[in-house]
């Protein structure tokens, strides 16, 4: 599970290449790209909260708890299109995007601090 969430897939590298190609002077791509993980994080968080609420409602409707019996019945039906992998993909993308933005920020910071004599 850890490798699937933290690993870097080919489509994430394609995203980085597209971002670097679109990082043209005056487009402010770095500013606008920061909103993607924010919007996705709000959407994924809202959906996960909704799933938790649905599971809690299912438990509340049963009114009985038997020791050793599984009260909560997880189901793929709670997720978008019945596919929880979409949520996993979005979480993976958000983590990668945030790591990329932090790395890009430090790259720019080091470039500025080193001075114009080292600029490419």
Image: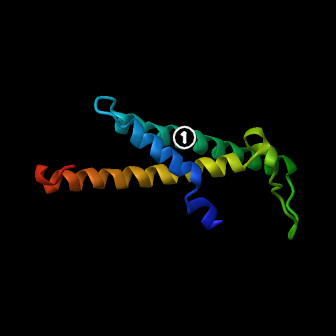
Residue 24 point in image, percent of width and height = 33, 34
Give the camera-side residue of 38 and 29.
29
Which residue is label 1 attached to? 40
| Residue at the image point whose x is 54% and y is 50% from the top | 12
Visible in this render: residue 10? yes
Q: Which residue appears farthest toward the top when viewing the image?
A: 26
Residue 25 point in image, percent of width and height = 28, 33
Judge left or right: residue 83 versus residue 8: right
| Residue at the image point whose x is 80% and y is 54% from the top | 74
Choose top left, top right, bottom left or bottom right for residue 67: bottom right
Visible in this render: residue 34? no
Q: How is the image coloured?
A: rainbow
Judge left or right: residue 10 versus residue 28: right
Q: Quadrant of the N terminus?
A: bottom right
Residue 116 point in image, percent of width and height = 12, 49
Judge left or right: residue 68 versus residue 81: right
Q: Secondary structure at mark 1?
A: helix
């Amino acid at each position: 599970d850890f490798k699937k969430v933290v690993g870097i897939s080919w489509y994430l590298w394609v995203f980085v290449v597209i971002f670097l190609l679109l990082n043209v002077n005056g487009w402010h791509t770095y500013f606008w790209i920061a909103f993607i993980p924010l919007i996705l994080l709000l959407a994924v968080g809202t959906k996960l909260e909704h799933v938790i609420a649905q599971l809690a409602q299912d438990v509340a409707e049963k009114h009985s708890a038997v020791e050793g019996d599984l009260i909560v019945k997880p189901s793929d039906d709670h997720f978008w299109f019945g596919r929880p992998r979409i949520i996993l993909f979005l979480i993976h993308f958000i983590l990668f995007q945030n790591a990329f933005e932090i790395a890009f920020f430090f790259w720019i910071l080091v470039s500025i601090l080193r001075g114009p004599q080292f600029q490419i």
